[in-house]
């Protein structure tokens, strides 16, 4: 075991997969000599050469499309989209192409490929380096969308994503890159792509969250335990699509109160899907309204810090929502 | 447009008599299968037809350079001639047309013309135009990374060069000298929009800007296309990088069975192009070379007709997939 932050864990996962499988490669903007704008791929070009850690032109449709073409010819590409906000030119290649290859060829062609991209609001990020894009991809059968938060999960899930025969969109909350540190196994291991995780057991209410909001929710849950004696169960989906409904529903049925927190725009969000599942399938167990907390329906976090802080649901808003629900 | 036939005979291209007859047979087969598809559509038996008529020389001439199951091809929805040349059968075409379970492209999931074969390295085709080009570049990159001599043939119509994917792929292929041959089958129309409203300047000449050769070729002359593609494939196999081939041809039918081309083009124009029909032109060459005469032609046509009859009969009797099979094969296992 070694203490790693999220950046380091993802880096290590990539490097280990590249060492153990010669078909694994990385392509994207500035991933080579520069090691990526966040340094996730630092040192990989030196170790594996510029061919397997390839700097691409600034063309996201090409990056994804080329990854598809590599994946159907024996390679296991890991494409990096520099910021999730830049993914839209590659949207057609992800949604219409990679995700549909297997279905439309009746199982003849699959795309074993991973697309990594940093998402989420960060100070100074503004409208085009802050977006939470997950909802755009979470109604695409054939695609897996994962958003691990903690370093050990991220490393294990990246390995699973690379080994998976399907296209996997791998979302990394950029504000947690250096914020969250924990022990990460150094021996080979993997974390499945179809299992949610209960981070904190509780009896009074369930909070489902991911990314920076999960980290904040866990802190608030401790505070509520100490200050109010309210025990919050905190569940992380880890994979946003397809959802592990069972783990989420088990928790909702156990506590009878349910809140989803994310920093994505609320309307049409993944939170909405999770809430709908719980509202229908845990109805008999619920003692309060299924609640959601998210960002207001404005384009993204602003450059000005006060506006950015207003955009992202912070600890205070999360605490207020939890207490409101606890009082039912 | 200055239309010239091939300047060299087939011997100089390294083609045997048997090669020529195989090319001819494939072109004729593609035409006859296509014609029957329209009949089935007008009989109300086939929901949709997308046509290859007029493109047969461009397709067969280029694809004759492929090593099936080793090289990769990204066809587009008119490339019946390529699918048939590589080894798909008339049965396959009618099973696909009628959306039957045995349709090798998609088991009835996709429209006809959206070819796919894992065994033949025909990569599953999409409907939106141009998306195949970045994918083809990636597949070529895999060959290059492994030091293999595989070549990727990427096909589309002239309108597929208008979108960004085409530029992104051309640029990337040029940067890395990728073993890919871009075949643009310029048939002058994208549904109704003519080339002059679609293409600025010359498609072939754009290759120069990307740093690799672009050649314009008479797409209705199968040997001229073969010659251009042969050179392109040799370049690719030799590590010299991509080539763009613009095959000038003409779409002899409406865009699809749902289109009425009388709205946007004159009958005289089509008649003019029928005089330049690639199959007629190749027949003339074969007759002059002493490889074909009226009797042989009729014999071959009769055999193709009975093959088509049998294929239609088989496909009509073949079952659909169960409706619930729509739920299967969304994700690959393992």
Image: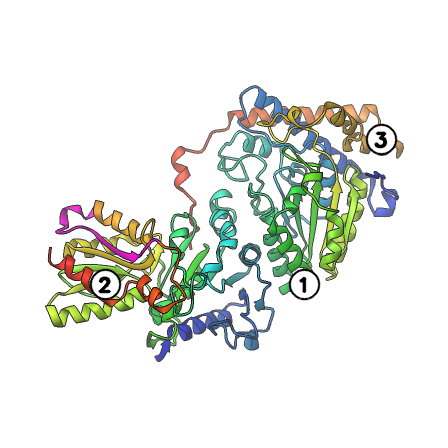
Whether residue A109 is situated above or below residue A179 in the rendered picture = above
Asked if residue A143 shows in the view, the reply is yes
**Marking on residue A152:** none
| Marks 1 and 2 belong to one chain | no
| Residue A286 sits inside the magenta stretch | yes
| Residue B105 sits inside the magenta stretch | no
Residue at the spot of label 2: A317
Look at the image and tell me in which quarter the C terminus of chain A lies.
bottom left
Residue A59, quarter of picture: bottom right
Q: What residue is drawn where x is 68% and y is 39%?
A: B197
Separation of disc 1 and disc 2 at Cα? 51 Å
For disc 3, the neighbor class at 10 Å (few under 14, some 14 to 19, many from 20) is some
Q: What residue is drawn where x is 31% and y is 53%?
A: A266
For disc 2, the neighbor class at 10 Å (few under 14, some 14 to 19, many from 20) is few
Separation of disc 2 and disc 3 at Cα? 81 Å
Please report the bounds of the magenta region as a residue range: A281-297
Q: Position of residue A191 (x, y in %)?
A: 35, 65
For disc 1, the neighbor class at 10 Å (few under 14, some 14 to 19, many from 20) is some
**Marking on residue B175:** 1
Name the foreground residue: A236 vs B224. Answer: A236
Colouring scheme applied when the structure was drawn = rainbow
Asked if residue A155 shows in the view, the reply is no
Q: Residue furthest top?
A: B43
Q: Position of residue A61 (x, y in %)?
A: 55, 55
For marks 1 and 3 on the same chain, the one whose residue lies earlier in the sequence: 1
Q: Nearer the viewer, mark 1 or mark 2?
A: 2
Residue at the spot of label 3: B284
Q: Nearer the viewer, mark 2 or mark 3?
A: 2
Subunit ID for the residue under disc 3: B
Separation of disc 1 and disc 3 at Cα? 42 Å
């Amino acid at each position: 075991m070694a203490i790693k932050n999220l950046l380091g864990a993802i880096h290590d996962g990539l490097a280990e997969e590249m060492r153990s499988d010669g078909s694994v490669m990385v392509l994207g903007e500035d991933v080579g000599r520069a090691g990526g704008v966040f340094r996730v791929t630092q040192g990989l070009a030196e170790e594996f050469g510029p061919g397997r850690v390839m700097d691409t032109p600034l063309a996201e449709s090409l990056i994804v499309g080329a990854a598809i073409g590599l994946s159907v010819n024996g390679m296991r590409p890991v494409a990096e989209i520099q910021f999730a906000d830049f993914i839209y030119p590659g949207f057609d290649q992800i949604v219409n192409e990679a995700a549909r290859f297997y279905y439309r060829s009746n199982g003849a062609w699959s795309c074993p490929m991973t697309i990594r991209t940093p998402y989420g609001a960060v100070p100074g990020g503004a409208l085009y380096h802050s977006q939470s894009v997950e909802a755009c991809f979470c109604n695409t059968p054939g695609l897996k969308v994962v958003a691990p938060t903690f370093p050990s999960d991220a490393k294990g899930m990246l390995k699973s994503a690379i080994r998976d025969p399907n296209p996997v969109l791998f979302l990394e909350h950029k504000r947690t890159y250096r914020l969250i540190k924990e022990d990460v196994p150094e021996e080979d291991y993997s974390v499945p792509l179809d299992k949610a995780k209960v981070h904190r057991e509780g009896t009074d209410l369930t909070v489902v969250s991911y990314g920076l909001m999960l980290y904040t929710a866990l802190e608030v849950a401790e505070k509520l335990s100490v200050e109010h004696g309210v025990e919050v169960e905190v569940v992380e989906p880890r994979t946003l699509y397809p959802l592990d409904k069972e783990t989420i529903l088990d928790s909702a049925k156990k506590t009878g109160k349910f809140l989803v927190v994310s920093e994505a725009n609320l309307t049409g969000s993944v939170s909405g899907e999770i809430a709908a599942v719980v509202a229908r399938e845990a109805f008999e167990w619920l003692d309060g309204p299924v609640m959601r907390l998210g960002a207001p329906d404005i384009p993204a976090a602003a450059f000005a810090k006060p506006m950015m802080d207003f955009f992202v649901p912070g600890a205070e808003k999360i605490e207020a929502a939890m207490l409101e629900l606890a009082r039912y | 447009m200055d239309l010239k036939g091939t300047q060299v005979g087939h011997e100089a291209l390294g083609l045997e008599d048997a090669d020529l007859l195989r090319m001819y047979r494939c072109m004729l087969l593609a035409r006859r299968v296509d014609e029957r598809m329209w009949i089935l559509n007008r009989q109300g038996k086939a929901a949709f037809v997308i046509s290859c008529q007029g493109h047969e020389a461009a397709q067969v001439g280029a694809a004759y350079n492929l090593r099936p199951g080793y090289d990769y091809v990204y066809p587009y929805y008119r490339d019946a001639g390529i699918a048939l040349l590589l080894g798909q059968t008339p049965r396959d075409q009618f099973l696909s047309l009628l959306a039957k379970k045995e349709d090798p492209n998609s088991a009835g999931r996709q429209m006809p013309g959206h070819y796919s074969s894992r065994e033949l390295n025909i990569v599953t085709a999409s409907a939106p135009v141009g998306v195949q080009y970045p994918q083809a570049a990636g597949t070529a990159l895999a060959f290059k990374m492994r030091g293999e001599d595989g070549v990727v043939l990427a096909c589309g119509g002239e309108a597929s060069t208008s979108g960004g994917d085409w530029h992104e792929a051309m640029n990337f292929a040029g940067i890395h000298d990728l073993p890919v041959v871009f075949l643009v089958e310029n048939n002058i129309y994208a549904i109704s929009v003519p080339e002059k409203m679609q293409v600025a300047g010359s498609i072939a000449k754009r290759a120069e800007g990307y740093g690799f050769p672009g050649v314009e070729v008479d797409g209705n002359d199968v040997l001229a296309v073969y010659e251009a593609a042969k050179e392109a494939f040799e370049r690719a196999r030799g590590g010299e990088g991509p080539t763009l081939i613009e095959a000038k041809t003409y779409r002899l039918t409406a865009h699809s069975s749902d289109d009425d081309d009388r709205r946007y083009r004159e009958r005289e124009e089509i008649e003019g192009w029928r005089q330049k029909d690639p199959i007629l032109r190749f027949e003339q060459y074969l007759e002059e070379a002493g490889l074909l005469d009226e009797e042989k032609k009729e014999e071959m046509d009769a055999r193709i007709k009975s093959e088509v009859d049998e294929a239609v009969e088989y496909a009509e009797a073949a079952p659909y997939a169960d409706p619930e099979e729509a739920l299967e094969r969304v994700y690959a296992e393992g």
